[in-house]
Amino acid sequence: MSAPLSKHLPKSRTAAVTIAASSIGTNQQYTRPQLCLSTRPSSTTAATTTTTTTTTKTYPAYTSNNCNCARNIVPQINHIFHRQLTTLGDAAKMSTMPAQHGHSEACCNIPPIVSKGYDAKGGYEELGGYKTYVTGPSDTTKGLITIYDIFGYYPQTLQGADIIALSGTTKYKVFIPDWFKGEPASLEWFPPTTEEKQKKLGAFFQKYPPPSIAGEVSGYVKALSAKYPEIKEWAILGFCWGGKVVSIATASPENPFKAGIEAHPAMVDPKDAEGIKIPLALLASKDENPEDVKKFEANLTGPKHVETFGDQIHGWMAARSDLEDERVKSEYKRGYQTVLKFLSEHL
C-alpha cells in the first residue's frame, strides 16, 4: 500500500464492518426487510439537506433486497473492505474541500480537537447494571445517552461526549453505557479471512442485534433518573450500529426521549421514521444509501435536520475518525457543532 493511501487509514479499529452489520438478522419481534449490500454499485442522486440549504450530489449507492443476510455476512464484509480502500483514496483527493454549511458560534464554543492521545474528562460508574462513561456538570437538568458503535469506548467517541457535555451554551450530562460488557468487536477479526474470524464476527452480530439493545434503553433511563433525579429531560445519540438503536428506541411507545440524533447510522430504514414523533437529526456520511436517507427524511413527521457530509466516511464522528487528517478533524468538529445546535433547539 502506498504511503499517501495508508496515511488515510484510521489509527483505531476500523468501523467498515458496521455497514455490513446492517445485514444481520435481528429477532422475531423485528421483521422489517433488512439491508443487503449488492456487489454491483449503481449511481444514485441524493439531496444533501439542512434546515436552510439543499444541494444535489451523485454518490455510489447499493441496492437492497430481502435475503438471509446472516448467511452472507462474510462476503459482504470483504466487499466493503475493498470498496473502502478505494473511497479512502478519494477522500484524500477531497481533503481540501470547504465546509458546505456554516454554524452560529452562539450555540457552542468547541475547544481545539485533540488529534491523538486524548485525555477523557469524565469517569466511569456502574449504572443500571452497566459500566457507564459519565461526563458533564452535576447541576444540569438535561441528560444525553450516547450509543457507541460496535467498537465500544474509543478516544474519538469519548472526546465527542466531552464536547457535548461542556461546550454548548447549555450543559449536558452525557452517559455512554457499555452494552458489550467489555467485549466489543475486535479489529483482529477483520477482514474475516479465516473460519475462526468468521465465526467470531458472526456470533458478535447475532449476540447484539439493535432491537435487543433498544429494548433495554427505557429501563436504563429509569435507572439513571433514579440516580440523577435532577435530570428532567433526556435525548439520545447513536453512532453507526447505535444509530439503528436510536431509530427503534425513539419509535417505541415507551420512548423516554425528547430528541434523537443519528450519526452515520447503519441499517437506515425509511419505515423506522414513520414511528418517530420527536425531533430527530440524521447526519449521514457518503457511505449510507442516499435514497434510503432521502426516504427516511420524508417519513419523519416531527422537527428534523437531515444532512449528508458528502466527503466523510461511515464512522467519522466516532471510533473510525482519523483526527490526524485535517479535513476529517474539521468535519468531526462541524458534526458536533450540528449536534449541539440541534440539542439547543429541542432539549
Image (tube, helix red, strand yellow):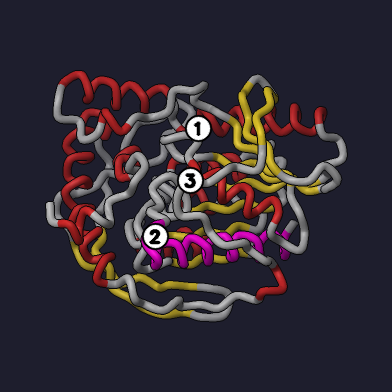
- At 63% from the left and 63% from the top, the residue drawn is 110
Helix, strand or loop at disc 1? helix
Residue 275: tell me if it is visible: no
Cα separation between marks 2 and 3 = 25 Å
Name which quarter of the figure residue 124 lies in.
top right
> What label does residue 285 carry, if any?
2
Name which quarter of the figure residue 144 lies in.
top right
Residue 122 vs 86, above or below: the answer is above
Prevailing SS of the magenta stretch: helix
Image check: 103 left or right of 8?
right
- At 50% from the left and 36% from the top, the residue drawn is 153
Residue 257: tell me if it is visible: yes
Cα separation between marks 2 and 1 = 23 Å
Q: Which residue is denoted by mark 3 in the rendering?
A: 117
User: Within 10 Å of the Cα at label 3, are there few (<14), some (14-19), or many (20+) other Cα atoms?
Assistant: few
Range of the magenta residues?
324-346
The verdict on residue 331 being magenta is: yes
Name which quarter of the figure residue 48 lies in.
bottom left
> What label does residue 211 carry, if any?
1
Number of disc labels: 3
Image x and y of residue 157, in percent: 52, 45
Q: Quadrant of the C terminus?
A: bottom right
Give the residue type that dot 3 points to: Gly
Q: Nearer the viewer, residue 130 or 302?
A: 130
